[in-house]
């Protein structure tokens, strides 16, 4: 993957021109999806549907329907035979595939405007596009303050992948029956809840920022397990605030990709100190070089630029080699790497060297 | 073209995900091009270049170079072998192909922000994205007022294709030795200048808006042919202002696509009145259904949405069938259609029915 030329000159020119018109094609795709045209075409199945029938169903002008259908032909979302339009497989994925929809909504609601500041972000090492969403230094304190429909696009994107990966990881973590588990970046408390349900004896400590911790606290109370969950509320980048210690297991899911390599090393060094002698650090991360499908790697590689322009300006979805170097630099060794978590995650188990 | 499914399910999912991340991929491509990374990779030819060498040449951080290179792998602009990056054919087109560059600059400078208002534009029949460029009802009065670097992207896009198509068209128009020629949408006077150079006896009348006419007037004066060129300065949509009349030839290049079908019929009816009995109306237009290559059709289909969101809200790059219907409705007949003009233009010759 990524080491061979795959295209003829003609195919390459087509790919280049598709990139050249990408923002227009993107907005046209959204309009086709959200203005009901793809739904009308999809419902017509193999019979197909005429422009007049689509006008009738969508209440849009002939002009509006026509320019969108024609753009859709070029993007291969639909095909036309005898003036009847039918959906292609690509159109099917745009309309019906949850993974595609979540990514598209994330691109639009979180990234579209801000991505216009990508070059500035890269030069300054700051998320220069974030000003399009709000007046924060990083996106994290802003997450609970985003307008609901925009916040939804972020959380759907954030949860979709990890929700598919965590059940298998939960089994692996509890094979060793940890008594004290530190959940770093505990977020809305989902993982802590799953842990208390999995093992009646485990004691959890959630380590997160105040905004997130408040949400988690309420959820745990509602579930009646708040007496088994402690909170360590702090910004992990403040190195002078000591970690709690004495843990059998430390859990970080989709957390370290939010930091630069220097920050990752600093966090892992402090995790090392917080760990019992034979304790294990469990790290669940997607690595773009460990993907089975090129399209999965592509999604992660593009998501990196969300971190650049919108999130914090210095983190990314890592190549495993760069990430493993951080683990080594922190005085830890990888004792197990399982690439079969959910769609595209790796579960690393680390111990003190 | 456009009538068959061409992809496997896996390819279709990849295409859908590429669309889902399109704005990010677009901005990453621009950053790779404009921050010197593709140039550094291109210059390394088949030897390839390391990330450290690119950092040295571009003065960018490792992080900045790395996230862009990784995005570039996913977009297949580059490949990597033994940690040395080389350019793919797609990367070559992004960096070196003038057609791709002009389209990409147009997408960014004219369309990127405004395209975020596409759905509003389609619902209202107005270019709702134009407010991102300036306070005009259509883009045309704004063209001479755009900041120079943005105006350049528009004019480069506008001229690139037609400049390649007009020399052959000039030969065809002057086969019939027209004495009086009406040049509608004369713009900066390029065509009028070419006509006066081609035939020492022809008398031209340029029909355009005041802003454009001023520019043309000066150019014709500089060339010493202003005594052979008249001006009819008016808005062609004002039906109450009569056309001049008595022409052997009427010329419209890449002009009628700026209007709705009803407006095209109105313009052509008045052209019919302005024409001598055996005079000819020459119409140079790109039609997306007459393209040899799918990528050329794709570019035109996406360009339609620029008209929707940015230009005037009701025009497009037409399918020839819809356009020919307008000609028929105006009381004209096509006596010749030549699809071999430049990259992708058709020259229609029309006479009174």
Image (cartoon, coloured by chain):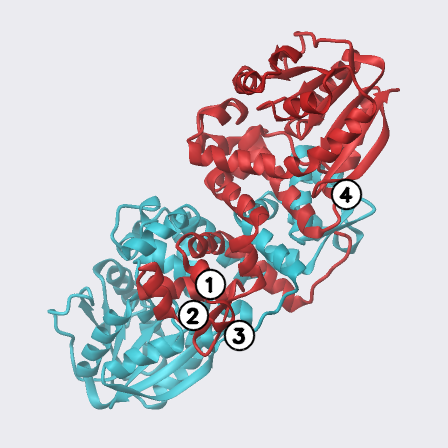
Chain colours: A cyan, B red
Helix, strand or loop at disc 1?
helix
Q: Residues within 10 Å of mark 1 (few under 14, many from 20)?
A: some
Q: Position of residue A334 (x, y in %)?
A: 33, 87
Near mark 3 (Cα within 10 A), the count class, few <14, some 14-19 or many ≥20, is some
Which residue was labeled with disc 3?
A3
Residue tagged 2: B49
Q: Nearer the viewer, residue A347 or B47?
A: B47
Q: Which residue is mark 4?
A: B290
State how far apart marks 3 and 1 are (Cα). 18 Å
Q: Which of A220 and B139 lies nearest the eye of the viewer?
A: B139
Q: Is A169 displayed left or right of B107 in the figure?
A: left
**Chain to which mark 3 belongs:** A
Q: Earlier in the sequence, mark 4 or mark 1?
A: 1
User: Which element type, helix, strand or loop, lies under badge 3?
Assistant: loop
Dot 4 crowding, Cα within 10 Å, few <14, some 14–19, many 20+:
some
Given the image, what chain letter belongs to the residue carrying mark 2? B
Q: Indicate left or right for A239 with A124 as reference.
A: left
Marks 3 and 1: same chain? no
Q: Can you see residue B122?
A: no
Q: Where B319 falls versus B176 (above or below)?
A: below
User: How many angstroms separate mark 2 from mark 1 (CA)?
Assistant: 9 Å
Verify CB contact (< 8 Å) between mark 2 and mark 1: yes
- Tell me the SS state at disc 2: loop
Using a 10 Å C-alpha cutoff, classify the residue at mark 2 as few (fewer than 14 neighbours), some (14 to 19) or many (20 or more).
many
On the same chain: label 4 and label 2?
yes
Q: Are marks 4 and 1 on the same chain?
A: yes
């Amino acid at each position: 993957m990524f080491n061979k030329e795959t295209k003829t000159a003609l195919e390459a020119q087509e790919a280049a021109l598709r990139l050249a018109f990408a923002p227009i094609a993107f907005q046209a795709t959204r309009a086709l999806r959200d203005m009901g045209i793809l739904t009308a075409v999809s419902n017509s199945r193999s019979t197909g549907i005429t422009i007049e029938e689509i006008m009738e169903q969508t209440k849009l002008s002939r002009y509006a329907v026509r320019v969108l259908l024609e753009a859709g032909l070029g993007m291969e979302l639909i095909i036309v035979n005898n003036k009847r339009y039918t959906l292609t497989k690509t159109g099917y994925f745009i309309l019906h595939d949850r993974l595609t929809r979540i990514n598209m909504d994330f691109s639009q609601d979180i990234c579209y405007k801000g991505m216009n500041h990508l070059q500035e972000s890269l030069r300054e090492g700051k998320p220069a596009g974030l000003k399009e969403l709000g007046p924060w230094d990083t996106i994290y304190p802003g997450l609970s303050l985003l307008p609901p429909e925009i916040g939804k696009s972020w959380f759907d994107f954030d949860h979709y992948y990890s929700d598919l990966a965590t059940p298998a990881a939960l089994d692996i973590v509890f094979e060793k029956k940890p008594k004290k588990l530190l959940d770093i970046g505990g977020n809305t408390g989902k993982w802590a809840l799953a842990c208390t349900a999995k093992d009646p004896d485990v004691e959890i400590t959630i380590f997160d920022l105040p905004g997130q911790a408040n949400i988690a606290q309420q959820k745990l109370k509602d579930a009646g397990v708040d007496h088994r969950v402690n909170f360590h509320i702090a910004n992990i980048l403040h190195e002078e605030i000591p970690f709690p210690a004495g843990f059998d297991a430390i859990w970080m899911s989709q957390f370290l990709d939010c930091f630069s390599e220097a920050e990752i090393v600093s966090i892992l060094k402090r995790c090392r100190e917080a760990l019992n002698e034979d304790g294990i650090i469990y790290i669940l991360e997607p690595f773009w070089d460990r993907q089975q499908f090129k399209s999965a790697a592509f999604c992660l590689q593009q998501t990196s630029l969300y971190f650049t322009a919108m999130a914090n300006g210095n983190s990314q979805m890592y190549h495993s080699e760069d990430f493993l170097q951080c683990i080594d630099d922190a005085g830890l060794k990888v004792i197990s790497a399982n690439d079969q978590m959910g769609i595209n995650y790796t579960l690393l188990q680390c111990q003190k060297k």
